[in-house]
Image (cartoon, rainbow, N blue to C red):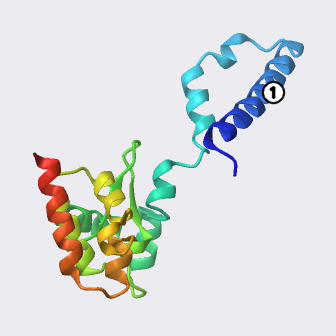
Amino acid sequence: MVTLAEQQRELMDELTRRVQDTFDRAREAHVSPAAFADVKSIARAMTAALPHVYDQLIGPFYDTAGLTQWWGVSRQAVNKAVATGSVIACQLDGGGWVYPTWQFTDTGTVHPHLLTLWRTLRDAADPWTRAVWLRSPQPELDDRTAADWIVDGHPLDAALELARADAQRWAA
């Protein structure tokens, strides 16, 4: 099994080769250094394609455009659902919103027990932490995630008890 450190080294080696090739070609073509002046923007663009940790832990996600299309509603209707807490939503660094796909039933509604857990954790944690909690295996739920536990039809009580205990512990 390949480790993250090994993957990082391999990626850095490949990036180094490609960046070196780009700069070699730029020198040969007498490109102005100004073309590469905004180093932070270039690095941000290069890393934008990397898998996001939250994608692996919480995803996949719908974005607002995808959710408006699936629900057949306006962007304002989705924003209202976010504001009223009737959908599980996490805000991205750029300001956009994403909605974990696992919260939705086949008909596009949000499982009400998942919203109960989401609201229980609300005052103790930010949305990303709450989403990670919902997708983290819990020993008390037979090593299943709270989201899977609920979606698979198990009673809310066991997961709600865990959510309340963790919310209380986080708030302390």
Query: Helix or strand or loop: what does disc 1 sit on?
Result: helix
Give, as a three-letter code, the residue at label 1: Arg
Give percent across and percent down for residue 99.
Answer: 39, 64
At 63% from the left edge and 37% from the top edge, which residue is drawn?
5
Residue under pointer 1: 17
- The quadrant in which the C terminus is found is top left
Q: Residue at x 66, y 13 (%)?
A: 34
Residue 144's image quarter? bottom left
The count of marks equals 1
Q: In the drawing, does residue 58 fall left or right of residue 139?
A: right
In the rendered image, residue 4, in percent from the top left (x then y), is placed at 61, 42
The crowd level at tag 1 (other Cα within 10 Å; few <14, some 14-19, many 20+) is: few
Q: Nearer the viewer, residue 98 or 160?
A: 160
Q: Residue at x 45, y 77 (%)?
A: 70
Q: Nearer the viewer, residue 34 or 1?
A: 1
Residue 123 appears in the rendering: no
State whether residue 115 is above or below residue 55.
below
Residue 114: x and y in percent read 27, 74
Q: Is residue 48 above or below residue 107?
A: above
Q: Residue furthest right?
A: 28
Quarter holding residue 101: bottom left
Residues 144 and 92: in front is 144
Whether residue 30 appears in this view of the structure is yes
Q: In the image, 107: left or right of 16? A: left
Choose between 113 and 33: the one closer to the eye.
Answer: 113
Describe residue 149's horizontal placement relative to residue 26 as left or right: left
Q: Which residue is at 74% across, 36% downward?
A: 10
- Compared to residue 150, the image places residue 56 above or below, namely above
User: Left or right: 22 with respect to 61?
Assistant: right
Residue 74 coordinates in the image, percent (x, y): 35, 70
